[in-house]
Amino acid sequence: MTRKINNSYELGQSNAPTDGGDMLKTRGDGTLVWEGVADTTFVPYSFQGSNSGFYAGGYGSSPQVHQTMVDKISLSSSSTVSGHGDITTARSNVAGQSSETDGFTTAGYVSSWSMSNVIDKFSFSSNTTGTDHGNLTVSRVTVAGCSSSSDGFTAGGEISNSVNTIDKFSFSSSSGASDHGDLSQALRGCSGSSSVDYGFAAGGRNTSARVGDIDRFAYSSNTTATDWADLTVVRMHTAGHSSSDYGFASSGESSGMHTEIDYFSFASGGAATDHGDLTQARNQPAGISGITHGITAGGTPGGGPIYDTIDRWAYSSNTTATDWADLSVVNTNGAGTQY
């Protein structure tokens, strides 16, 4: 049989075995189906990870060089991380995107001033070297990463100065990225957060100064982003995180290094709210999003030192983060993903 919703017909069984009726559920590919309430075959897409987080690429170790490393971090137990293969090319100042099965890293420095347009893909389930998954529309660095259920987005960045470019690429096809509109202004050093329908780019530096703006853009339409909210402190090089209802920006740099964790609503724009502090003031860490907690990994206080610190903090309470684990090497400017 079929059932009609908003003038569209969706598949369903008239005699589906149910415990309390049928409900509309979403397949992994985004299609809608009617299934019994007790049926757990179809699970809605979730950006947040319930198993592991990953830190990919970056700049660090001794001597300090661009990295190919991928570290795997448990989201449920505090322990030192394990190695999880490599990305294809040593790069720093990269962005991370997450599908249900794979992590992606985009853009970045491959040497002191040489920039990359590479989109790398690595499997969450196997410890192997990543594969080339196409290219962005233009090479750049210090970009923000966002993810829908089917596509990755790389927003902003720097070439000779800040740019407003938003690229979109398919998780399932290695055909490369396409232009997906623009941020409301040229921004580099902004961080990405992801809701079900929108991507967000927080903070950064425009062509002349650091900003506290948070931009929002739709996954479904190629249009210019809108100014959605504002951070509590103007800063750049924050880490981006996402719960199911809120975006978070942790750490960052303005006149000095910051410990702040800010959060803002996906549903309503306005000013962000202070949500506690990290254990160390730093900038350029990677952001990882669990179901109940955010993780801020690596970073630098500037002036030479680089951290291996992995901080963990709760979405539900405004408290100081805890030291959760350590990266396999000191590292900054890497990308965070999760599953």
Image: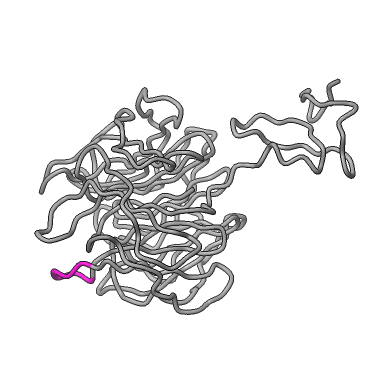
Instruction: Give the quarter of the image for residue 79.
Output: bottom left
Q: Which of 80 and 188 is in front in this view?
A: 80
Instruction: Give the quarter of the image for residue 299.
Output: bottom left
Tell me if residue 329 comes above or below residue 282 in the rendering. Answer: above
Tell me if residue 27 comes above or below residue 49 in the rendering. Answer: above
Residue 303 location in percent, x, y? Answer: 14, 70
Residue at 28% of width from left, 53% of height from top? 334
Residue 114 magenta-highlighted:
no
Q: How many marks?
A: 0
Instruction: Check the picture and name the quadrant holding the N terminus.
Output: top right
Residue at 44% of width from left, 32% of height from top? 171
Q: How is the image coloured?
A: one colour
Predominant SS along the magenta part: loop
Residue 11 location in percent, x, y? Answer: 78, 24
Residue at 57% of width from left, 43% of height from top? 197
305 sits to left or right of 72: left
Query: Seen from this angle, which residue lies furthest top?
Result: 1
Q: Nearer the viewer, residue 62 or 189?
A: 62
Tell me if residue 239 comes above or below residue 139 in the rendering. Answer: below
Residue 108 location in percent, x, y? Answer: 23, 44
154 sits to left or right of 276: left
Q: Which of 117 and 162 is in front in this view?
A: 117
Tell me if residue 80 comes above or below residue 83 in the rendering. Answer: below
Q: What stretch is highlighted in magenta?
A: 301-306
Residue 20 location in percent, x, y? Answer: 89, 44
Residue at 47% of width from left, 36% of height from top? 223
